[in-house]
Amino acid sequence: MTTANPHWAKRARERPWQQVRITPALYAGPTRDIERAIRPLTDAGAVRLDDGRGNQLIISTDGRIRLGLEPEGGDVKWKVAVHERPFRPPLWTVSLTENTPIEVVEAITTELADRLRTGRRLTGGAADDEWRTPLQAHG
């Protein structure tokens, strides 16, 4: 007997760019090593602010990416917001709980940091060939 959902397995094969692979799987899980998730952005020049109570805010130098960490508050531990311009509403946000594997948070911040360094768009809109090409290749 298999516990895998065939619909999700098919979807994962069709959309490999949406997968975050964690190997070995036993290491995936919540962790206290927040530096792994923060380091990609700080290495790309983002500024790190700490309120002295463990809450932190990491802001890219251009103000378009914000990563918030609130380790002791409520269900949401991480919040990422991506802005087209610093003082406009975010284009997109993601909120992650304390149960989110640190590898997932690290994958998000690594991709955002890479986009900052290379000047690539921070969105995956239809006009962005980088996101459209894999879809067109699959018909």
Image: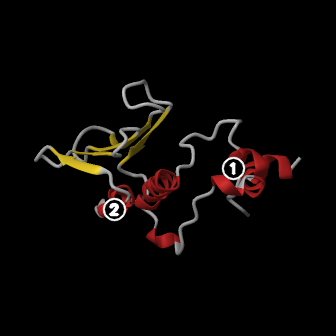
Q: Position of residue 71 (x, y in %)?
A: 25, 48
Characterize the local packing of mark 1: few (<14), some (14-19) or many (20 or more) Cα atoms within 10 angstroms.
Answer: few
Q: Secondary structure at mark 1?
A: helix
Q: Nearer the viewer, residue 94 or 11?
A: 94
Residue displayed at 46% across by 65% down: 28
Residue displayed at 43% across by 30% down: 85
Label 2 belongs to which residue?
31
Q: Nearer the viewer, mark 1 or mark 2?
A: 1
Q: Nearer the viewer, residue 54 or 65?
A: 65
Q: Position of residue 44 (x, y in %)?
A: 38, 57
Characterize the local packing of mark 2: few (<14), some (14-19) or many (20 or more) Cα atoms within 10 angstroms.
Answer: some
Label 1 belongs to which residue?
130
Residue displayed at 39% across by 52% down: 99
Q: How is the image coloured?
A: secondary structure
Q: Nearer the viewer, residue 85 or 93?
A: 85
Inspect the image, locate mark 2, and give the three-letter code of the amino acid beneath it. Thr
Quadrant position of residue 32:
bottom left
Q: CA distance from mark 1 to mark 2?
A: 32 Å
Q: Position of residue 118 (x, y in %)?
A: 52, 55
| Residue 94 relative to residue 50: left or right | right
User: Which residue ends up furthest to the bottom in the rendered image?
Assistant: 24
Residue displayed at 53% across by 43% down: 122
Q: Position of residue 3 (x, y in %)?
A: 67, 58
